[in-house]
Image: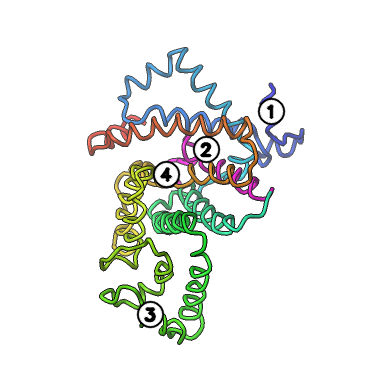
Amino acid sequence: MDFLKYFPIQLDNTKIMTGTGDAAEYDICRMIVGVHRHYSIFLTKEKIRRNQRDRDYQECIINEVIEKIRFRQYGSMFFRREQLLSGDEFLYFPVPYELFVMCMRAFGLMNRKSEPIFFYYGDLLGYTLSALTLMENNFLSNAYPLCRSMIELYLKILILKKHPTASTNYGKFCGFEIDQSCCSQKYPDEFIAIYINRKFLPANSKSNYLHFGWLDCIESYDTKRNNRYSIYGILEYLMNDDGQKDELTHLKFFYKMCHGYAHGSTIHVKYPLLQYFEIASMIFHVIRPVFTDICQTISFPVSDEDRFLLTVLDRDFKKLNEQYQKKSTENFELYYISC
């Protein structure tokens, strides 16, 4: 019964009778359903029933639900009792649940030490938690623009970590953006003077230069194409580092995919499970390395709890990724018929 210590249980007959208290059983049942549905993706009804009767499978579900209970103070303690839009409770599926926990843990770690990079990481975690909250309430399409912004900020952080001296220029251009968009609605004179002397004259979009002109202060940033002042220019530059190429390839794919949600007419999708795969994957490829970097930045030994969280997340994402590779219309139809 040790797991009950993770729930603020008080004997109150009124709350027990009305169901308005923190019922451990209700939260645990949601965890059981989330883990079970995670393992049931693309299985037939017959296979799902066999699993439900199998003792080893039951033990697997029990063990993984206990894992989630251990993280509850950073996870489901913050979740809504009722969704704003009823549907799949994807936030109780293992990977989104653990990503939410990782974000909350990251905020706690950053509070231990003040570092300039944490200013950007705070914004990044804000995008992530916002996207996960939209997932919680089945506003899945609305999460894509946030994930797109999350990826953009992450790529900017990567290049600023490689070239810390560029932070001053980046901050200056952020000031130009604020003046232009929030104050005068016109480009500041100082910005125009810098724009006229930009390094790559064929790229003549003031708007693009406003967002990415700060890159000119990085000598090794020698992209001589029209995408120089864009997120794709940053991607091209960063992908020259073989150590990051595979990870950045995933992010480039997902970033392009977000375009239809951010600027197009992609709103309603027939299979929400597809969006669950994509949103969880985008967040994993950003938050997993960010969490590790936060631990390294504060020069604090990774706790056993955080090491366990990383291990569990890697295990569950491997399963999710295997399922994502099997996506097809037939399998999506099977999921919604079987589950």
Q: Residues at badges 3 and 2 in contact (C-beta under 8 Å)?
A: no
Q: Which residue is mark 2?
A: 98
Q: For the residue marked with disc 4, what is the amino acid? A: His
Q: For the residue marked with disc 3, what is the amino acid? A: Tyr
Measuring from the top left, give residue 11's x and y in whole percent: 77, 33
Q: Which residue is mark 4?
A: 285
Above or below: residue 222 compared with residue 103:
below
Q: Which residues are magenta?
A: 86-112
Measuring from the top left, give residue 319's x and y in whole percent: 39, 30
Q: CA distance from mark 2 to mark 4?
A: 13 Å
The total of numbered circles placed on residues is: 4
Q: For the residue marked with disc 2, what is the amino acid? A: Glu
Q: CA distance from mark 3 to mark 1?
A: 61 Å
Q: Residues at badges 3 and 1 in contact (C-beta under 8 Å)?
A: no
Quadrant of the image occupied by residue 88? top left
Residue drawn at x 68%, y 32% as measured from the top left: 6
Q: CA distance from mark 1 to mark 2?
A: 20 Å
* Closer to the eye: label 3 or 1: 3
Q: Earlier in the sequence, mark 4 or mark 1?
A: 1
**Colouring convention used in this rendered image of the protein:** rainbow
- Looking at the image, which is closer to me, 219 or 11? 219
The stretch drawn in magenta includes residue 177: no
Secondary structure beneath label 1: helix
Q: Earlier in the sequence, mark 3 or mark 4?
A: 3
2 vs 92, left or right, is right
Q: Residues at badges 4 and 1 in contact (C-beta under 8 Å)?
A: no
Q: For the residue marked with disc 1, what is the amino acid? A: Leu
Point out the residue furthest to the front here. Answer: 219
